[in-house]
Amino acid sequence: MDTRYHYDPKTTPFDPDAKGYHFNNALWLAAAGNLAYENEKTIRTTVEKWGFKRFRFLHFSSPVGASDSFLPVDTQAFVCSNDKVTLIAFRGTEPLNVKDWFTDLMVGSIPAPVGLGNVHKGFDAAFAAIRPQLQSTLTEQHHGKTPIWITGHSLGGALAMLTAVQLKFSHKLPVQGVYTFGQPRVGDRTFAKFTHRVLGDRMVRFVNNKDIVPQVPSPRMLLNYRHNNQELRFDPNGRLILQKSWWDRARSVMKKPRVDVAKLTVEALTDHSMDRYVERVRQQIIETIKPT
């Protein structure tokens, strides 16, 4: 069995009305975030096994220099729904996709498409490219009542957050939860405060150990980027811990002994793997049901 995106709704049923962190929902959304990297046929077949009859594959790819925003983008996502829930999942950065790297590296400031503050220019372009397809799909599949859950890994996490803010604030749709994995910073302090006001604890951001991507772009760079939401961090042993404040995080860093720089670099990259996130989330369920 391929456990990268295996999810059994019978043994670990998700709760469409849950708020904040729910371990079964985390596994479902982690699996969906990993599945978003696959081709349309694989995704369709898998979500049908999950119990979703309505499905649409979303993809927009522009040639270099041809995008309206002059940025080359390659955005991929999927939407599926049933009578209980609607799921939106975004693909993250593909290592060999040069357009994804253009998106990630375009760190300049641009006014937020929704609300207050400024956001990462590349993320905004990738979001704008897929937005018409997403809106038409929701018109077809969603009728304003069933809860919407959104997920994504890496770049996909940034797109998930931008999508959630627009759907919740502008369209007044019932966004129930947003789980992101290895998500980079998306906007400035003003935008971070705005998104927190709109989404609150409906958004949960997972960070695996020394994953480097959640630390970029640096808050000292052009836009003064900030995270806005609850962080759940996996420690080196895979245990899930809640980082309550910046001071707690600072103290934990100061107490750690020095480590080999080369080893730190490797961990910073390998800990970003979505496969690793799925393993970590699955481990939480095993620990939860383990007899004492």
Image (cartoon, grey):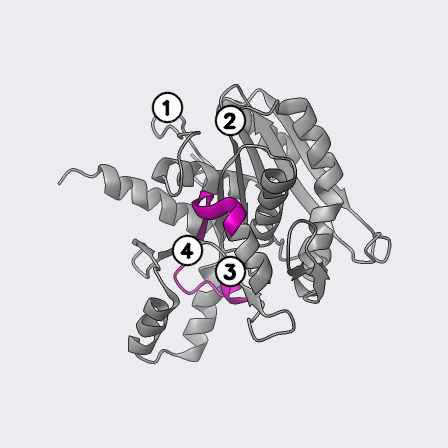
**In the rendering, which numbered label is found on residue 85?**
2
Element at label 3: loop
The Cα–Cα distance between marks 1 and 3, rounded to whole angstroms, is 34 Å
- Name the residue rendered at 79%, 58% in the picture: 71
* Disc 1 residue type (three-letter): Lys
Where residue 280 appears, as percent x and y from the top left, is: 37, 49
- The magenta-colored residue range is 197-216
**In the rendering, which numbered label is found on residue 10?**
1
Nearer the N terminus, badge 2 or badge 4? 2
Number of the front mark, 2 or 3 = 3
The Cα–Cα distance between marks 4 and 3, rounded to whole angstroms, is 9 Å
Number of the front mark, 1 or 3 = 3
The Cα–Cα distance between marks 4 and 1, rounded to whole angstroms, is 28 Å
Element at label 4: strand
Q: Which residue is mark 4?
A: 231
Mark 4 crowd level (few <14, some 14–19, many ≥20, 10 Å Cα): some
Where residue 264 appears, as percent x and y from the top left, is: 42, 72
